[in-house]
Amino acid sequence: MKAPKEKLNIFICSLRNLFEKLMKAAFNYCLVLFGCLLASNYTYSQITLVSSDLAQVGDTVTRYVDTLTTITPGAAGANVTWTLTNATARVTETTKVIAPSATPHAASFTNSNIAMTNDNQNYLYFNKSSADFIATGLAGNLLNNGSTIVAPLNPTLTANVFPSTYGTTFQDNYGMDVTTSGSSFGVNSVRFKRAGVLSDTIDGWGSLVTPVGSYQALRIKHTDRTIDTTWIKLLPISPWSVYSTKNTTTISYSWMAKNAKLAIAELAYDTLGNPKRFTWSSLTLTTGISENTLNNTIQLFPNPASSYFDFKLSDESTSLNGFIQIENSIGQTVYKEAISSQTGRIFLDKIQHGVYLVRIMTEDGRSFYNRLIIN
């Protein structure tokens, strides 16, 4: 019996797309550093992002996707500004980070401590420790045909090792071998195998501007070289025969910032080298202050700001003298000035683009906060 070629090609394409999802999720967790501002001279220096800065079980991250993107990645190097604002949100993705025990396939991924899902049907599995982050596989209704496929990675993929820094390179081999019923394709069985080599280079750091906000970020270039082989078995007693073999090299980029949980932005290319998909986070970062703590007692305008901003402390009962200070995304003070009025103007000529926290501390011991974007 001859296999319907079109259905088989769709099956192969679907499995390749699954790997894209798995690799994209792994990229989100790639260890990176991001630039920080020093209060003494307002220049960047490198710090290390550790495992605890990334997404944990219980997190939910919403991101937007432009599936018709014309975004390009910009330059590599130190102290770069990437302005990636020319994007349209065509798809919204919400990723939940859950315990593997909360999924239907936990028994197949006992070496995992994190799972992620966008639809509560398909799950990606990982093992995260203080030393490394490893992709272990995927499972669920992967082909959207009602059939369950469980696909552990063997060997697993070490996406990165903690800690990393600007200029760090990393490479690892990974693979998957899946056999499933071929009844939908007019054959007995179909086997799909991938052998891949992922190479990562942290090739730039600086300021990233997306449609949501500005971030101090590090950029990772991902190069994924794969060999995909598909076999078919016509009858239960038939030998396996090779249906197709394909060698592919794909390039993608991701930008990471501290406390961002997943990648702040990602750019994927198709196999012809054309921009295919740009994803950015809905998250606007603050400096160790939760959204519940931020308030409008300090009014900042304009916001976003460029060369200056005006502040107004609306609580007229608050006594001054005091201080106003600006903190970057790791809590370092990049500007501080004594104030004796409810209003004033702060000039930003020595402060880099990014997302900051403006804090007013009064002489009676009270503190007020608000977020400021500088672009």
Image (spheres, rainbow, N blue to C red):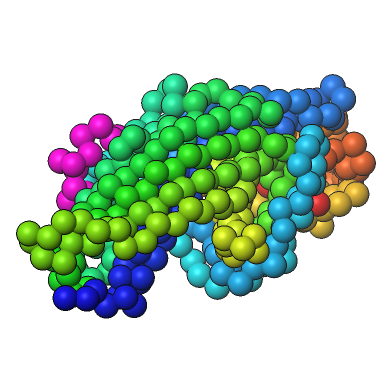
Q: Position of residue 330 (x, y in %)?
A: 64, 31
> Is residue 39 something that shows in the picture?
yes
The residue positioned farthest toward the left in the image shown: 237
Looking at the picture, does residue 81 appear above or below residue 3? Answer: above
- Prevailing secondary structure of the magenta residues: loop
- Does any portion of residue 314 appear in the rendered image? no
Q: Residue at x 28, y 47 (%)?
A: 177
Q: Is residue 61 left or right of residue 341?
A: left
Q: Nearer the viewer, residue 366 or 110?
A: 110
- Height in image: 265 above or below 45? below
Q: Residue at x 37, y 48 (%)?
A: 194
Q: Does the magenta run of residues contain 337? A: no
Q: Identify which residue is drawn at 48% across, 57% down.
A: 62
17 to the left or right of 345: left
Magenta stretch encompasses residue 110: yes
Q: Position of residue 352 (x, y in %)?
A: 82, 40
Q: Position of residue 191 (x, y in %)?
A: 24, 56
Depth check: 276 or 174 in front? 174
Q: How many marks?
A: 0
Determine whether, in the image, residue 273 is placed left or right of residue 261: right
Q: Which quadrant would residue 235 be assigned to in this image?
A: bottom left
Residue span colored magenta = 103-120
Q: Residue at x 49, y 26 (%)?
A: 161
Q: Where in the figure is residue 180, as x and y percent of width and height?
A: 19, 59
> Foreground: 308 or 98?
98
Query: 141 or 373, which is in the foreground?
Result: 141
The quarter of the image holding the N terminus is: bottom left
